Amino acid sequence: MEGAKSASDSVDVLLVGGGIVSATLGAMIQRVHPEWSLTVFERLDEVALESSNGWNNAGTGHAALCELNYTPEAADGSVNISKAIAINGQFLTTKTFWGSLVTEGAMREPSTFINNTAHMAFVRGDANQKFLRERFRLMSEHPFFHDMEHSEDYGQIEQWSPLLIEGRPAGEKIAATYAPSGTDVDFGAVTRQLFEDFVARGGALELKHEVTDIERNADGSWNVTVKNLRDGATRVVRTKVLMLGAGGYTLKLLRKAGVPEVKGYGLFPVSGTFLSTENPAVTAKHQTKVYGKAAEGAPPMSMPHLDARIIDGQRTALFGPFAGLVPKFLKEGSVLDLFQSLRTDNVLPIATAGLENLGLTKVLAQDLLANQAKRIEALHDFAPTAVSDDWRLFTAGQRAQIIKPSSGTKGTLQFGTEVITSANGTIAGVLGASPGASTAVPIALDILRSSFKDEWERWENELRSVIPMLGTDVASDPHRALELEAEADTKLGLPKRG
């Protein structure tokens, strides 16, 4: 039976969700207002158990070095690299923040969360060779990608990643790019270390506590009802600012709060499974992250990739993703999540978005019907000698992609993240996924700009001491951005770029 509701208490800032976004926001706020009271509520019994967990994401430090969906190809064969430049700049910002925290002692030895791992793009066939050549030509001319290499030669590609070539029939049309400055990141370790520092600085972290209701007060503050899942007791916490980093449950909480900015929004849940191996004979031959091209008509989230990983100190290799259809918005969510999210204002946007994304439906159907033999067959495109007995299937994270209202009653499925902030800035939330954790620092900065408009100018100056990239226009001054990246890489123990 639910316990009695306790008397109200009050905090300056309340954060919901024990993932990397809340951890990053908490770290930033504590550095500009160390006297403020901050509380984080997480419904599970540990932090970083959902999308931030090392086993629930690809671990790629997303810098657009290998992800082909960030460089779309037009019908005339032209390639647009503008998004790749922006994504790379965002990750540079993230690295400068982490580097500063390592210097402070707020984060531990860098190899516990970030390691140099080359990023490769790998394609097959004449048309894809042509695409990759043009992509490389454009990217290698930009300072961010000056050390990228390109090859269509078996011998060179084998040097970069032996597993890609071993057992491959001679004469196949293949091509690859190689970016030696890529990284593998254990975002779960990042999140846990940030929260350890958060608590050490006086922040309150309440595990097994779930937010059940949100009401706005006349003065613009919020009353947040939270339930202790251990004993059923509930209490109301009053907060000036409410920040929601609750993954797939963020939209539900924004709706509870009556935020008009999410009218018409819906979510589409997609789960992912991966093949994994820790066989040293395999992992020794594959120490790169290799991304391929999504099938014709398939969404970018279905890009196949073979990743060298270090999770909790263990070297492994993962291949996937294989999509699954589970109606949950969180891995530890409810099978009723999708049904309970339906509203009169979002039913039509969700339905029309589904009709306009039949490619995703096809991918889901194929992956759901695939057995181990089919999955190994897909893996053979990347590793021709892969043996089924070496690879086990596991379920990775659950993603809730945004369905955003567009014209009339139509909805658009969005593959990315979006920050929703109320008009007065007192409540904000993060929706969506990918590149997600890699852009937690820019996402947090966007939230702070919107929620603390009156203080932002002072905050920006103070935060620059821990985020040196802040205020740098990476588009107009890429060389300065690279200088700051070099300083961060030294702090993070990453090799100097060539």
Image (cartoon, rainbow, N blue to C red):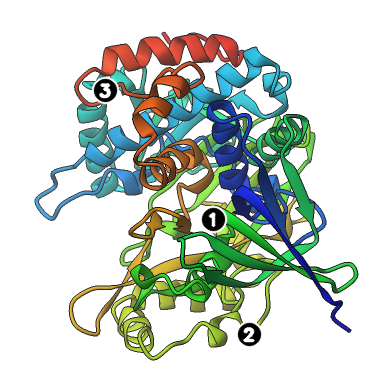
Task: Work out whether residue 263 or residue 35 is closer to the camera in this orientation and state it.
Answer: 35
Specify whether 239 is left or right of 393.
left
Specify whether 45 is left or right of 184.
right
Specify whether 187 is left or right of 176.
right
- Label 1 environment density (alpha carbons within 10 Å; few <14, some 14–19, many ≥20): many
Q: Percent from the top left, x then y, of residue 42?
A: 72, 57
Q: Percent from the top left, x then y, of residue 182?
A: 49, 27
Q: Earlier in the sequence, mark 3 or mark 2?
A: 3
- Mark 2, secondary structure of its residue: loop
- Label 3 environment density (alpha carbons within 10 Å; few <14, some 14–19, many ≥20): some
Quarter of the image that includes the N terminus: bottom right
- Mark 3, secondary structure of its residue: helix
Q: Earlier in the sequence, mark 1 or mark 3?
A: 3
Disc 3 + disc 2, Cβ < 8 Å:
no
Q: Residue at x 67, y 20 (%)?
A: 110
The kind of residue on which mark 3 rests is: Ser
Find the distance from the CA under tag 2 to the CA under tag 1. Answer: 26 Å
Q: Is residue 112 above or below residue 222?
A: above
Q: Percent from the top left, x then y, of residue 21?
A: 56, 46
Residue that badge 2 annotates: 336
Q: Is residue 365 above or below residue 344?
A: above
The kind of residue on which mark 1 rests is: Leu
The kind of residue on which mark 2 rests is: Leu
Q: Is residue 482 above or below residue 372?
A: above
Find the distance from the CA under tag 3 to the CA under tag 2. Answer: 48 Å
Residue that badge 3 annotates: 140
- Label 2 environment density (alpha carbons within 10 Å; few <14, some 14–19, many ≥20): few
Quarter of the image that includes the C terminus: top left
